[in-house]
Image (cartoon, rainbow, N blue to C red):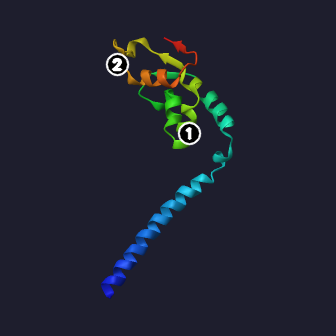
Amino acid sequence: EIHRLQSHIAFLQNQQHHLADYKVCLHSLKSPIRRLPSEIMLRIFDFACDMNYIASNSLRTIPALALKNVCLYWRDLTQSCPQLWSRMYIKRSKFPRRLPGLPILNLFLESSQQHPLTLEV
């Protein structure tokens, strides 16, 4: 009987931890940023993503990629906005001789879809 009760206590404690994690996830949904319409968020993203420095090692210089990596909601928003991915700066000294050596360029070209590209070399 004692073992059965101890296992039930362990089960309830485990369930309590899962509910606490779920509560944290739900709390993030109440964030004020979530109340902004997608169109406004995309306008903000468009202002934030002036130029993406391809072949950089820092996410600060690749704002479209940085925004994409925040959360699933922002990932979907950035993927739905090809103009964020269409502005690229490529420093010639860091550019490899073969395109397969720079997969991030392929990501930007695919994500920009049919939107006109702005390239600075």
x, y percent for residue 25 = 53, 56
* Relative image position of residue 39 (x, y in whole percent): 68, 35
Image coordinates for residue 116, horizontal then vertical, percent: 58, 15
Circle 1/circle 2 CB separation < 8 Å: no
Marker count (numbered): 2
Q: Residue at x 50, y 34 (%)?
A: 66
| Viewer-side residue, 3 vs 95 | 3
The local secondary structure at tag 1 comes to helix
Q: Residue at x 69, y 36 (%)?
A: 40
Residue 55 in sight in this render: no
Q: Nearer the viewer, residue 85 or 47?
A: 85
Task: In the displayed orientation, state which residue is furthest to the front.
Answer: 114
Determine the residue positioned at 34% across, 78% down. 7
- Mark 1 Cα shell of 10 Å, populated few (<14), some (14-19), many (≥20): some
Q: Is residue 64 above or below residue 99?
A: below
> Dot 2: few (<14), some (14–19), or many (≥20) neighbours within 10 Å?
few
Residue 75 in the image: x percent, y percent? 52, 37
Q: Which mark is residue 9?
A: none
Provide the residue designation for mark 2.
100
Q: Quadrant of the N terminus?
A: bottom left
In this figure, which residue is indicated by the disc labeled 1? Answer: 74
Residue placed most toward the observer, 55 or 29 = 29
Q: Amino acid at mark 1?
A: Trp
Above or below residue 20? Residue 52 is above
Separation of marks 1 and 2 at Cα, in angstroms? 27 Å
Residue type, mark 2 in image: Pro
